[in-house]
Amino acid sequence: MTQTIAPRVRTLVLLLLAAACALLAAAGPASAHAALTGSDPQQGAVVDKAPAQVSLTFSESVSMDDDSLRILDPKGKRVDEGRPSGTGGTTYTVKLHAGLPDGTYTVTYQVVSADSHPVAGAYTFSIGAPSETSVSVYSTDAGGGAVGWLYGLGRYVSYAGFTVLVGGAVFVLACWPRGSGVRPVQRLVVSGWLALTAATLLLLLLRGSYTSSGKLGDVFDLSLLGEVLQTKPGAALVSRLLLLAAAALFVAVLFGAYEKREDEEKRDLTFGLAVGGTVVAAGLAATWAMSEHASVGLQAGIAMPVDVVHLLAVAAWIGGLTSLLVALYRAPAETPVSALAVRRFSRVAFGSVVALVVTGTYQSWRQLGSWTAFTDTRYGQLLLVKIALVAVLVGIAYLSRRWTARLTEAAPAVVRQREGTTEEEGVGAAVGSKAGKTEKAGTPKKAEASGAASGAAKATSTGAGSGESADTGSGKAAAAVTGSGDSRRAAQLARQRAAVDAARRKRQRDADPQRFGLRRSVLAEAGVAVVLLAVTTVLTQTEPGRTEEEAKAANPSSAAATSPASGAVTLDMPFDTGGQNGKGVVRVELDPARVGANDLHLYVERPNGDAFDIPEVKVAFTQKAKDIGPLPVVPDHITTGHWSASGVQIPIAGDWEVAVTVRTSDIDQVTVSKNAQIG
């Protein structure tokens, strides 16, 4: 049974890890957590004279350096001077050169938000009238590239390491004290500590490049590292390393002095370890809470302790679940995980889920702000995926509780058959008692048939650790073998027999249907938990829904600028200049009718639909609500009755008046107009 299960387990674990990596890879660069909510001049605005400075307003405070804010002229040359300065908490300005000529200017920014994430973007404004520019308006992928991918991976590994470290310790102290002497559980918890420590060091090295150049070569730049240490995220990472030193001492005591104590002495030491471990675990969780989402925005004083409780609940549930999975699959037959330990973990998991529901509800309200943000923002959509995964996890956990109940019902009946067996021996006793009886009945016959060497093996496997009787049996067997001059062979046979007996007991234990069902359900829980952790990591790198909606409300033109094309606009306007052949229809087509560059086509037709030429035609765009325009456009004549212009700049979205001036002779002229929604 074990041989058929193990390959499936390894395959499933590999598939789940691959899915987690795919989620992280698809996450892309970290989204902005501080959004640009305003600017002066505004995005796409056309001003009459050159401004003395450019101001940007963000949804939260950000950190800047000399190159964080750049203003580029139409040829791509910088026209800003001096270091950007803050003028009002979230508003930052940079001065411009005097006497700037007319044209389109590009504003680019790359800053770091208060919750530690890089924010970048760009927009344009014009002086006098829009013009062609060699600078492309783009949204910078802050935190992208190889450095961004490594940083995201480091965040995932750090969360996973914290979960395994804290959850494993909780499982041993609160659920299964005998697990402190089980090597697979020890290796799991130590691996969590190593993963968290390595990931923290990696994040500290990557931090400077992640928030600035994005180059791998800058990872070991000591000047960048020095700047990182002076920031809030850098201080949080250093604090995490110091707390990990304390966590190493805790792990050493847990798997050293604690494991060697007797049951009575363990109770006294458990309290001290629980208090110390809780302080260290809460401190580690606080390094995230005090430097990321919870530390900024609405009700930060409440949000930070709530976030600490949330992280600890996740660790206790998912980390404990991982420890239970390892114990069920890897614990030796001599130290099986007990039914009592499984039942205790079930209570811990239930309490953790309750804490997660309460803290998660508060966090969702704080980060979203409205029901529509669930579907209208990426943060809300990811949160819906997380909620669905948690629901699946709770459903599987319910099945695990049913298997736990069956184990609890089955174990006492077998315990009563074995004198001196306690409930703490639980699952192993329930499955191993029948094997023990068979061995006691059959071993003497085999010993008589196999001579002195087999007698030594029998004495070792059945009597080791049972006091004087075991020593007497081993001594007689050893004497017999010594007489034959083959004591080493006897010892080897004894070890082989002990190994065979242990393997047989493990197979019989694993064949128990209740235990087998519990193992499968716990494995399924762990698989969903791996994906859930990946989604959570991506969620922490995504702009909160409340911030995104506030940015859209404060700067609707920015949202329109990044929206897809709205489709071509066609306007038919009859005209009559009053002279001979002065009547007709002018048709204006603007494609794709959005903010930015557009293609303009203009057609002039007689009332009967025939195309004809006129001496002159001009177009102008005006948005009276924003006091923009008129922005003149003089199209080129293409063919009879057809004029065209490319690269027609529409600076902002809104209701625009499109005016067409038609001249049919030297003195006959008229201007007709219609309004159109552009962008």
Image: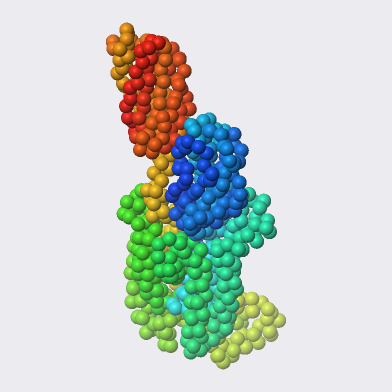
Which is nearer the eye, 277 or 86? 86
Question: Which quadrant holds the C terminus?
Answer: top left
Residue drawn where x is 64% and y is 76% of the image: 492
Q: How is the image coloured?
A: rainbow
139 sits left or right of 657 in the view: right
Determine if residue 339 is in view. no
51 sits left or right of 569 in the view: right
Question: Is 212 rendered above or below residue 100?
Answer: below
Q: Position of residue 490 (x, y in %)?
A: 64, 79
Which is nearer the eye, 201 or 165? 201
Which is nearer the eye, 434 or 30? 30
Q: Position of residue 34 (x, y in %)?
A: 47, 54
Residue drawn where x is 37% and y is 72% of the image: 351
Q: Position of residue 84 (x, y in %)?
A: 57, 51
In the image, farthest residue toward the bottom: 468
Q: Position of residue 248 (x, y in %)?
A: 59, 74
In the image, farthest residue toward the right: 485
Residue drawn where x is 33% and y is 25% of the image: 673
Image-quadrant location for residue 456: bottom right
Question: Is 443 rendered above or below residue 625?
Answer: below
Question: Is 664 rendered above or below residue 474?
Answer: above
Determine if residue 646 is in view. yes
Residue drawn where x is 48% and y is 58% of the image: 89
Question: Is 262 rendered above or below residue 397?
Answer: below
